[in-house]
Image (spheres, grey):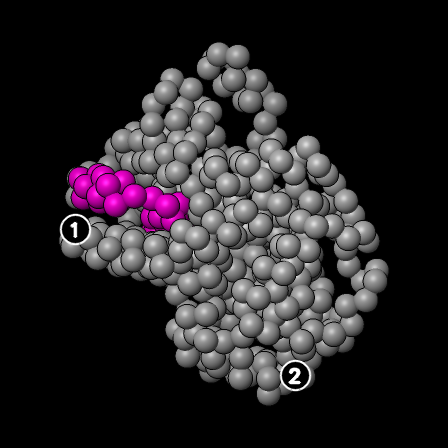
Amino acid sequence: MNASEIFEIESRHTSGLYTKQPIIFVRGQGASLWDIDGVEYLDCASGHGVANLGHAHPKVAAALAYQSTRLITLFETFYNDQRAALMQKMGTLVPGLDRVFFCNSGTESVEAAIKFARISTGRPGIVAAMRAFHGRTMGSLSATYNKKYREGFEPLVPGYTHVPYNNIEALEKIVNDQTAAVLLEPVQGEGGVYIADPAYIQAARRICDQHGALLIVDEVQSGFGRTGKWFAVQHSAVTPDLLCCAKSLAGGVPMGAVLIGQAVKNLVPGVHGSTFGGNPLSCAAAVAALSAIEEEDLPTQAAEKGAYLVEKIRAINAPLVREVRGLGLMVGIEMKQKVQPYLKTLQERHILALNAGLTVIRLLPPLVITYEQIDHLIATLAEVLTSDPVISPTE
Ligand SMILES: *Cc1c(COP(=O)(O)O)cnc(C)c1O
């Protein structure tokens, strides 16, 4: 299939849900992607934080190849060697969270955590934060804040309230004996790369304990080394009751999971489930991905590279930059104007980056990005952020 055929077919048959970019990617390695003409791009989007390990990680590829010839699918009613290996690993990542539920995506992991909180406490209330993003299925969407995602889908699930992020008083006021759970992202990703104060997460823990509510953290984007620790909640030294993860869990293969603490009760057969959840193929990929994160010490790499990147971006001192925020390699550059034209200019210079809302450039490079690639990113940002962006007539 040639390029024009690919454009034509996808354009004709797409659901229409995605803003398409006119580039065809066919290959990736580490932090690089190559288009169909062999042009190399630096990927600072990682598929919204999926490719923490980089593209086509050899360990993940080998695990997939091997497992695909042994056993691809098996419902969780039966036991399996790969699933057991993954449970053993995941059950020790966060001390106190030693049970795990497997699903296939981020929104499913949040959906499951919300159901677990309601069945465990027998209460309806879910308290989430303003600017939060938790996914697009009805239960998760009800916790997502931005109108852009919610409008047109009402009525959403009842029992949800939203409070300002990083505001302890607001949490104290809203949590009561009808609250099943407080649901928070330790770093808000889609919402603009806002980092929780450790004191805020600690207060959320205390307030939940006072009222018998559960603390759910959504680490779908911030997990698996991204912020410089295995999970971003560990910057606050807090143990949540439920921890949602997905995105980079299985090295790019679709998989989600919820880590479950002792306070979560009533998880008995039939209460919840997933046909594909815990399938041996995804489990084998995740086992390989987690051992690669450990062997390459990606959390430490993310911490060091992230600190370097943020320092260098701050030093650019572009007049239109309002603030640079970052924790590990989860970095936001807040501009005084809309960022879409800047993202377009970066893309024309073969760097892929993301927005987070209208005015924040979000960088989520693979944690294996090299210092040479980071320096190239910084040099390009220095040019792009200090010059007038290309504004196309359609924008
Ligand atoms: C991406 C994301 C989700 C949703 O994940 P999907 O796999 O797209 O359903 C949920 N929460 C957070 C914090 C995310 O970044």
Residue 84 magenta-drawn?
no
Q: Is residue 145 visible?
A: no
In the displayed structure, 221 sits above or below 204; it is: above
Q: Earlier in the sequence, mark 1 or mark 2?
A: 2
Left or right placement of residue 62 versus residue 108 in this view: left
Front-most of 346 and 245?
245
Q: Position of residue 359 (x, y in %)?
A: 34, 50
State left or right for residue 210 relative to residue 131: right
What type is the residue that disc 1 sits on? Ile
Q: Nearer the viewer, residue 184 or 95?
A: 95
- Residue sitting at x 39%, y 73%: 197
Callout 2 amino acid:
Gly
Q: Which mark is residue 117?
A: none
Q: Characterize the local packing of mark 2: few (<14), some (14-19) or many (20 or more) Cα atoms within 10 angstroms.
A: some
Image position of 310 (left or right of 185): left
Q: Residues within 10 Å of mark 1 (few under 14, many from 20)?
A: some
Q: Residue at x 81, y 67 (%)?
A: 268
Q: Which mark is residue 316?
A: 1
Q: What is the C-alpha distance between the residues marked 1 and 2?
A: 48 Å
Residue 253 at x, y percent in the picture: 58, 41
Q: Which mark is residue 212?
A: 2
- Ligand 1 closer than 8 Å to the CB at disc 2? no
The stretch in magenta equals 355-383
**Which corner quadrant of the image does residue 323 belong to?**
bottom left
